Every structure is written in structure tokens, then in C-alpha cells.
Image (cartoon, rainbow, N blue to C red):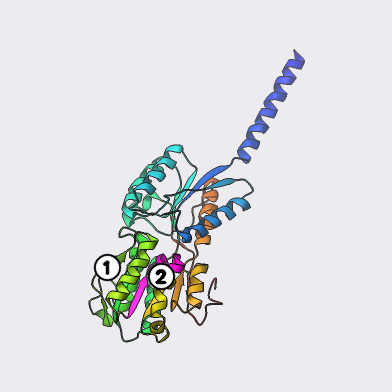
Amino acid sequence: MRKLLLAGIATAVVGAFGTASAQAQESYTFALVPKGMNIPFFDFARDGCMKAQEESGGKFTCEYIGPGEHGGGDEQVAIVNDLIARGIDGIAVSPSNAAAMGRALAAAKDAGIPVLTWDSDVLEKDKANRLAYIGTYNYDIGVNLAKLVQGIKPDGGTICIQSGGAAAANHNERMQGIRDTLSGTKSEAAPGERLTGQGGWTEVEGCPLYTDDDLPRSVQQLEDILAKFSDLDAFVPTGGFPQFVPNAYEAVVSKYKDKLDKKELALVVADTLPVQMELLKKGLSLGQVGQRPFEMGYESMNALLKIKEGGDPPKDPTYTGLDVCTQENADTCLGQ
């Protein structure tokens, strides 16, 4: 009887330590959800996610999952709804459609799943459904793009802004930054007031252009607008869309390189991926305003892990910084 009792005690002790050990070694699964997995910009966020996973020592797995291509946001919402239904441990999402994603995240909140947004945020009224935003101060991207344009064309002129999706909060905020800076007035809300002469700037007919992150379409839009308005003073994409198809972009812009060299056309573009920096160095843009997508993926995963381990959410918002690059500082501008 005594042996049986001791054996039972031993089993209980081993079981207790085994449970504690399992809890200590619990591994979470966090999802990093981009707008589209075919967009090179998001590859760097994925790399940051994987780096954080590697450094965690097995504490979590990064699941990089999103629509094959960026669309109106319906597929992305469906993916997030599936992650919630699966009971995933945490979600970091870059919303394609701010309004639709904001509503979807209410279910994650009800399920106790921590959610962060990165790169793009939800609407103000839905921010209670996520814990924090990690990424760029998107309005400031627009401000810096506009400042580059003003430096090239100080007397104003005609401009075409090329954006992503009409419902993408981040691109609307960037457009607002461009418009506000060029007009010299602060608008009430994104995407700001259309330029009709304010500050000497006028948006040409048919603009802004919306690419919906369709990269070949973005190049075609660029080609068409430059052909239609031969005296256009500025073309400003709020994302790297046409430059993400570098050969096609180069084929179009090379025809206007003389205008760029003479500063007759202010072609400045958001983002500073390596392929874009090569285009800048070739003289095929006059400026790039870049985000830091690697940091977005890296910081989002580490923040989710901290939350799951009982720590506080990150500061809302948490900004990851910008890089403003020109042909003059192209070799030194990144990561300053």
C-alpha cells in the first residue's frame, strides 16, 4: 500500500511539473495578413515576421497569409474571419478596406484574440476593435512627397496623384497629406480637398487614379496620363505600384527622362524598395519617400508575443519611421 501511495505521489509530482513545463513552452500562432501576397512591399514585412519568429526561440509561429492579389478587401475579410474561427492566438492585419475590416475585427475582440493593424489602419470609429497600429504615419508620407514636388516645381502647376484602393485608409491619408501641403491648408478628413488652383496646383481631369494594387494597370495609367497631358508638372504615386514592375516602368519613363533631367516633370514616388532605389539612381524618378515594412512585421509579432505573455499592448500608434531619398542622397538615405 505504501509503495502504491508513493507511486501515486510521484506520478502527481511529475504530472504537475509536466504541466508547468508545457505551459512554459507553449507556442503561439500569429497571423500577419497583408493586402496582397503579390506585392513586393509586403515581402519585407513577411521577412520581419519570420525574423521575430526565429528570435523567439520557438515561442510562436508566424503565419503569413493573405489574398493572392489585392482586391476590394472581401477576400482579406474572409481570411481574417477564418483565422478568428480557428481561434488563432493573434492577428496583425493591413486592411484593404478599412470600413469592412473594422467591422470584422469586432468578432476577434469578442473572442479575446488580440489584433494589431500595420501599414494601414481601420476607421476611427472601429479602432476599439484593435489594440494598436504599428507602421507609418501615412499623412506624413504625403507631406514629404509634396515637399519634394514643391522643391522641384516651386511655382506649382498641374498634378496627377496615383493611389491604391479608394477605400484604403493609408493611401487616403497620404493623398490628404499631399493635397494639404500643396494647398497650404489643412483639410478636415482624408483624402483631402481636390486641388483646383489652391497653392498654384490643379489636379488634371481623370485624377486621382486608383490602381487597386493592380501593378500592370498602374504602369498603363502612368503611360496614358503622361501621353494625354504632355505638359503635366507632377506625377505622384502614393505607393510604389508602377515601379514594382521595373522593366515596364523603365520603358515608359525613359521616354520622358529628358523632362526629368530638366526638372520639367516632378516624378516622385512612395516607398524605397531596392528595385525602386535602382530606378532613382538611374534618374527615372526624382525622389522616393520610403516606409520600413520589415520593422512593421517584426514589431507586430513581438508586440503580440508580449501581449500573450501578459505584457501591455504597444503605444497606439507606434510609428516605424520614414526615409526621404533623392538622387543626391540615394546612397545614404535609408535607415537614417
| Residue appearing at x 46%, y 68% in the figure | 246
Asked whether the viewer can see residue 254, the reply is: yes
**Residue closest to the far right:** 3
Q: CA distance from mark 1 to mark 2?
A: 18 Å
Query: Which corner quadrant of the image does residue 39 belong to?
Result: bottom left
Query: Which corner quadrant of the image does residue 241 belong to?
Result: bottom left
Query: Which corner quadrant of the image does residue 193 belong to?
Result: bottom left
The residue that mark 1 highlights is 188
- Quadrant showing the N terminus: top right
Task: Please rate how many residues cluster around mark 2, counting C-alpha atoms within 10 Å: few if below 14, some from 14 to 19, many from 20.
Answer: many
Q: Which mark is residue 141?
A: 2
Task: Point out the frontmost of discs 1 and 2.
Answer: 2
> Does residue 212 sit above or below 329 in this rendering?
above
| Residue nearest the observer in this picture, 59 or 153 | 153
203 on left or right of 25: left
63 on left or right of 229: right
> Does residue 61 sit above or below 202 in this rendering?
above
Q: Amino acid at mark 1?
A: Glu
Mark 1 or mark 2: whose residue is earlier in sequence: 2
Stretch of the chain drawn in magenta: 233-248
186 on left or right of 255: left
| Residue appearing at x 41%, y 81% in the figure | 257
